Image (tube, rainbow, N blue to C red):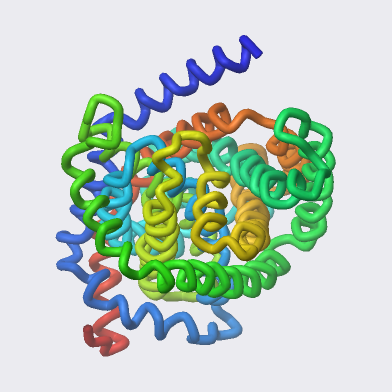
Amino acid sequence: MDTIKQLETVMGQLVGFLWGPPLVILLVGGGLFFLLYSRLLPYRYLPQSVRLLWRKPDRDDPGQLSHFQALSTALSGTLGMGNVSGVAIAIAMGGPGAIFWMWVSALVGIATKFYTCTLAVMFRGQDSEGQWQGGPMYVVREGLGKKWLPMAYFFAVAGLLGTMPIFQINQLVQVLRDTLAIPAGLASDNAHFTFDLLLGLVLALLVMMVALGKLPRLGRVTGLLVPTMVVGYLLLTAMVLISHASDIPAAFAMIFQDAFSGNAVAGGVVGSVIITGIRRAAFSNEAGIGTEAMAHGAAQTREPVREGMVAMLGPVIDTLIVCTCTALVILISGVWQSGESNGVTLTANAFGDLFPHGGAVILAVLVSLLSLSTVFTFWYYGSKCLGFLIGAKYQHYYIWWYLVLVVLGSVASLKLVVSLVDSMYALMAIPTMTSALLLAPKVNRAARQYLKSSQASP
């Protein structure tokens, strides 16, 4: 136990160092630069992004996923615990004001996604097996040249560690244990290791069944799971919020007031609120982190700008809609002030209080499916990073290590897991944002040509 506590302390200090002002400036300042540099293109053409979702790819277009499947795969990597548990952690650590800074990060993240995902298609590269791949490591290699190759490997290593399934599995096991197993007498508050381990083994089996089908099966699974679960989750939150509509204005007022006061954070430090919000938004919508670019880089299209426009919808759906719904439920319930729970348990308690007739159980089912879709997608991201590092012909071995991580995640420490993932996300952002900023002029030129040729109008 002492060793775990020491690791938690060390990792917490590392996260504090990595997520300092320089990284916040890189992510938010970089996103703001993209927004202004593009003359607000992401906002002006957002309606066209929705229309592009239903466009069928041409048969001879390179890539493996339709626009809809690429967005669903990218969203499956962000929707889930980042929206349910991540929001709860943001409020527990940074107070209600952290939600405001999550919104700010998402608003500029729309522009960031446009640039990073356009580049993911524009600079696709062949792996060692001759297959076309996309992602920040290929953007760096193909777009910036060999002298930048160390930065490509840097991203691949950070991506390999940052897309481990430990956090999602940890929180998934926690919500199933707290809402289903403990009330049913299958586990207790003090003795639940056996239940956690057995559930971890079952989840590993499910992951193996999807992963062995590779990317096409992943696209089909996420294309079905993500829309269904998002609609289900939004219906659940809508029922809760409509029944407590009179409390919503006060919740919004709390968010705006605390965003600039930091009253809910120990010491009243506004900077802590800002950094917490930006960090949790990065974990939620991954704008500027680079993982989403790996999914959009597999889109079946010859038009990089088209896929970049589809990717813009990610932060809107993920953070501005789903995360906001979760935050309102937590704030209206008041459970966040007790300090007795954190992560997904806090969200489950909020739903249980406001929707006592099965709300927590329904949430557990919805979150389970969303979380599993994230775990499926992270396997794909991790295998691509490994393939870049050691060769694509060896990347299929990653599934066996990934299954071990699933089992470990079921019994791991939450604090340690969050710190590890946060650290890797910070490191992944550096090459992703750096390459996007350097190659931004090429995106602008491609955008002008695409919009002119398609005669698109804002």
User: Can residue 319 be seen here?
Assistant: yes
For the C terminus, the quadrant is bottom left
Q: Position of residue 401 (x, y in %)?
A: 75, 38
* Closer to us: 180 or 424: 180
Image: 448 above or below 253: below
Using the image as rendered, state which of residue 36 and residue 124 is in the foreground: 36
The image shows residue 265 at horizontal and vertical percentages of: 29, 32
| Left or right of 244, for residue 205 | right
Q: Nearer the viewer, residue 36 or 13?
A: 13
Q: How many marks?
A: 0
Q: Residue at x 67, y 61 (%)?
A: 365
Q: Where, quadrant-wise, is the N terminus in this rendering?
A: top right
Residue 14 position (above or below residue 433): above
**Residue visible at 52% across and 59% down?**
79
Depth order, front residue of 220/56: 220
Q: Residue at x 62, y 40 (%)?
A: 164
Using residue 307 as the reference point, say whether residue 126 is left or right of it. Answer: right
Residue in view at x 22 percent, y 44 percent: 258
In the rendered image, which quarter is residue 361 located in? Answer: bottom right
